[in-house]
């Protein structure tokens, strides 16, 4: 039986850390579905609009070989609905979210992956602003 993996993120200013987490998530199953945070969700969550628009981020993530499907994530509180809608067997999140989604273990396996050390979208944006 094929395993569907689902993960979520903003994926703004796409970098190698994003690529590595998506590759590692894809390796946990046969099909990778990615929810890309809506511009409005990102603004609520991080207090700023993304550098790249929702549409651009969907195109970037959707173009990756390891990604089978992308969609817009409108709300953090709808994770259960997204998992069920896409038939996901595994939810993958970064370890900065560790424990936050454990209650979803009743509908799928929940895996928290370690983030790529020393790589941060915020740090990249701040570095560029300082140039």
Image (cartoon, rainbow, N blue to C red):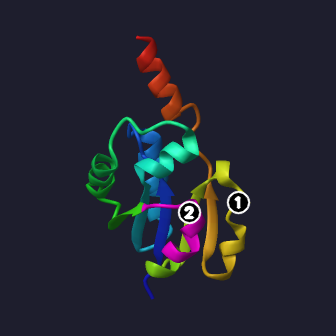
Q: Which residues are magenta?
A: 73-82
Q: Position of residue 119 (x, y in %)?
A: 52, 33
Residue 21 numbered mark, or none: none
Residue at point 49%, 36% (across, down): 48
State which mark lies toward you, 1 or 2: 1
Left or right relative to 97: residue 48: left
Residue 100, which numbered label?
1
Q: Residue at x 67, y 65 (%)?
A: 101
**How many marks are shown on the rendered structure?**
2
Most extreme residue toward the bottom, as rendered? Answer: 1
**Percent coordinates x, y for residue 93 in the rendering:** 58, 58
Of all residues shown, which one is farthest toward the top? 131
User: Residue beneath label 2, please?
Assistant: 92
The quarter of the picture where residue 16 lies is top left
Q: CA distance from mark 1 to mark 2?
A: 12 Å
Q: Residue at x 56, y 63 (%)?
A: 92
Q: Position of residue 72 (x, y in %)?
A: 39, 61
Q: Considering the whole magenta stretch, tell me its main secondary structure.
A: helix
Does residue 35 appear to the left or right of 79 in the view shown?
left
> Is residue 47 or residue 117 the one in the foreground?
47
Q: Secondary structure at mark 1?
A: loop
* Rendered image quadrant of residue 49: top left
Q: Is residue 115 above or below residue 81?
A: above
> Is 74 a magenta residue?
yes
Of mark 1 and mark 2, the one earlier in the sequence is: 2
Q: Is residue 13 left or right of residue 122?
A: left
Quarter containing the C terminus = top left
In the rendered image, residue 6, in percent from the top left (x then y), is placed at: 48, 68
Q: Is residue 20 magenta?
A: no
Return the residue nearer the eye: 101 or 39.
39
Q: Residue shown at 57%/31% (left/top)?
A: 118
């Amino acid at each position: 039986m094929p395993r569907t993996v689902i993960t979520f993120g903003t994926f703004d200013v796409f970098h190698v850390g994003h690529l590595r987490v998506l590759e590692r998530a894809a390796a946990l199953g046969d099909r990778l579905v990615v929810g890309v945070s809506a511009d409005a969700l990102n603004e609520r969550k991080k207090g700023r609009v993304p550098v790249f628009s929702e549409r651009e981020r969907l195109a970037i993530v959707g173009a990756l070989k390891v990604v089978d499907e992308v969609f817009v994530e409108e709300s953090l509180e709808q994770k259960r609905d997204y998992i069920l809608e896409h038939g996901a067997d595994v939810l993958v999140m970064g370890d900065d979210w560790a424990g936050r989604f454990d209650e979803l273990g009743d509908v799928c396996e929940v895996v928290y992956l370690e983030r790529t050390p020393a790589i941060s979208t915020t740090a990249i944006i701040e570095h560029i602003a300082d140039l």
